[in-house]
Image (cartoon, grey):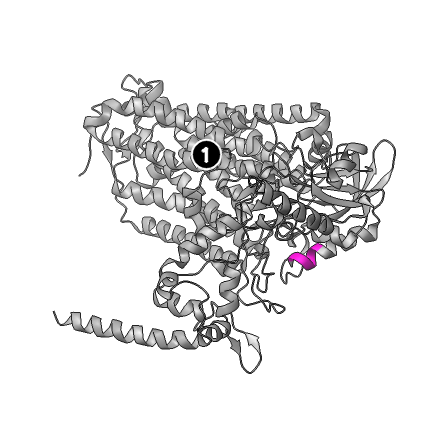
Amino acid sequence: MHNKLNRRDFIKTTSITSLSVATIASGITLTTFAQRKNPVTNAKRWGMLVDTNKLTETDIDSMVDACQKEQGWGGEKYSIGNQKPTWIRKLKVKDKATGKISNLPLMCQHCEHPPCVDVCPTNASMRREDGIVLVDKHLCIGCRYCMMACPYDARSFVHENLTEQKEHMPRGKGTVESCTLCVHKVDNGEQPACVVRVNSEAVIFGDLYDPNSKINQTLKKIQSTQIRADLNLNTGVRYSGI
Amino acid sequence: MYHWPIIFLNLLLATTLAYATEQTSLGDEARMIQASGKKHHGSESLIRKMHPEFLLHKRDRTSREGVRTKKHSLKNCVYCHANKDKKTNQYYSVNKSGQFCSVCHQKVSVSIDCFACHRNTPSKGANNAQ
Amino acid sequence: MAFDSGDFMNIRYQQIQGNSLGFYTLIAGLGVFILAALGAFYYMEYQGHWVTGMNNRIVWGMPHVFALFLIVAASGALNVASIASIFNKKIYQSLSRLSGLVALALLAGGLMVLVLDLGRPDRLIVAMTKYNFKSIFAWNIILYNGFFVIVGVYLWMMFERRMNKFSTKVGLIAFSWRLILTTGTGSIFGLLVARHTYDAMIMAPQFIVMSFSFGLAFYLLILMASYKWTNRELGDVIINRLRSLLGVFVAAVLYFVAVFHIGNIYLAENNNVATLLFSTDSIYTNLFWYGQIILGSIVPLALIYHPVFKQSNSMLGLASVLVIVGGLVQMYVLIIGGQAYPLEIFLDKEILEGYGGVIVYTPSLAETTLGVGGVALALIAIVFLLKFLPFLPESLSNKVADPHYKR
């Protein structure tokens, strides 16, 4: 029963609980409905766990599609080849020792120590308190140093003028962009579009710090890896099965 | 000293004309709100004077801290202040010449940087601004 | 006639006349390049970067090759002045003013290219007001701005007779600053831990040595051209000093390149990249061997040291041109070649689909025009300032350069 509890229900339950708790103990402020009014804090760390064994190639394609639909990238008129933005890509990899072939989605890994944030001259590249790595496009001067620094080649530069952007996802020529972990949905208590689309155990999204969250509990149980773990970036996106 | 009255008259005329264009470019939703006698935000003079600060403050709060309230949200500005082309039923861009933002901004020669990235029309499905 | 004396009583500085047909042709010619560069900038900015050869894999293209080359050369061009101030070499003192000028002009040219290639150059004010002090790039912005101020003051100390006594001290500051500046420029690449093609702090000293070589080559060309075109005397004493200095610098660059690549080959993790750079027949391999090593290093060394060419000023000029061309090729191999090879996202896995491959980058005309415009801007600034301020000694004959000179 507890396993089938989805995030929405979970939030409902917790908010009711915390509401009632809040009325008793007025010290508690971190209720769900207050989330959007107050700045996010480092009490949470958003993360994602991708189980490549459970994920089919079609699943990954639909994750890419969900991302494009949600964020509005991929319809650029003039950009060709590698000029086209890629917020999330499907990779087919082969283990050098065992020869095992796996497919996985690769996007911004939302590092705890992101190289893109370190190199950004204007603080445009930034990490939110809750671990989501974003580009503040108001400050981005388009120097592309973050793209040089990212170990995952996860960032894209907008090569042309854009119109009709999504209201929740401003994007514009001359600035850098990447996976936002659907921050606009997360702030409303929803899950990222790609996670919703796959709708299975294969991709779990949640608060890494919360011992009651599914992602936290699963990570405790199973073997998982971080890509380029040698760089000690402590990524928010984890993989199992590779 | 004759130029002072001329400047004054010019300013007067410009203000009156600006007021007239402003009424037509106010935006469909905003005009309805105005007609209904409701107030959607603080005084016009306050918004006119302070909107850069409001937007600047809000943008940092939202994009860097995740605060997503309706107050001073650019999405809301666009939602109310966009006009529809009556023939095609399509929205004009708010920063198009003669539309809400441009009426003043062109007059004072201040370029608007918002819409290099932000959408300049209400999105199709939008029926209540968030 | 405007002149003032330097540290020697026998050195008199004088502006170039700058009213000949040749002078105006030069200005007009350079002006055309600058206008073309501005046009190219407007085109790229208006359309967006899709009109360039750059993409999300080659994020820094031709403009960065020129910009970083000019910035590196700028700090190197200051060397002549530094040698005079710090090591108190009298023979170089007469050359110091020009050294400061070339340094400032090259930096201005490089920064113009760098800024005009930004995605949002209109937000330069953001770059100047919001600093992330963890970012090497932000430090570089401060270092570049500081360089302008310090070299400006240094020039003032050299020009103003009452201030001459401070020029050694300011020269020392300028020299330290330029070392830090080039360290910073090298660190832009050296600190990219994610990229096997860079990620080596040897790039900082390597950039310093590169700056010595490129900067001196530029300086020599400008010195020789201005003395030839204004019919002033430029003796062997000075030329031969600078010639052997250039030879040492070119050889030093070669040494650093060798150490850098040997290090890369030896480190197992960089094996793939090293193999790609040295044993495939990609354009970067060819550019490296034929452009950077043979044309940009071996041939100039031969022109500088071989007895047959040793007496010829035009051969030294040719050597300088080749050092500059070789330097641009070196920057191209370093910047573009370094990005062309895919990142090693997985250390124990091979990527079959979705990412990889060596990128072929074809710079567009607009990008190259912008880059060349940076060089033109530097040159036009030098030409103009030579006309308006007394940077050049009236004569650099052997007797002026070295009072004890005996034929």
Helix, strand or loop for disc 1: helix
Quadrant in the picture for residue A103: top right
| Residue C363 position within the rendered picture, expressed as x and y whole percent measured from the top left | 59, 50
Does residue A200 show up magenta in the picture? Answer: no
Regarding residue C237, the answer to whether it shows in the image is: no
Quarter occupied by the C terminus of chain C = top left
- Residue C24 image point, x, y percent: 32, 51
Residue at (56, 45) in percent of width and height: A144
- Is residue C106 visible in the rendered image? The answer is yes
Percent x, y of residue A147? 60, 43
Identify the main secondary structure in magenta: helix
Start and end of the magenta stretch?
A: A67-71
Residue most extreme to the left = B1
Horizontal side of residue C90 vs A185, given as left or right: left
Q: Nearer the viewer, residue C373 or C306?
A: C373
Q: Quadrant of the N terminus of chain C?
A: top left
Q: Nearer the viewer, residue A64 or C44?
A: A64
Count residues near mark 1 (Cα–Cα under 10 Å), then give few for <14, some for 14-19, many for 20+: some
According to the picture, the residue beneath numbered tag 1 turns out to be C139
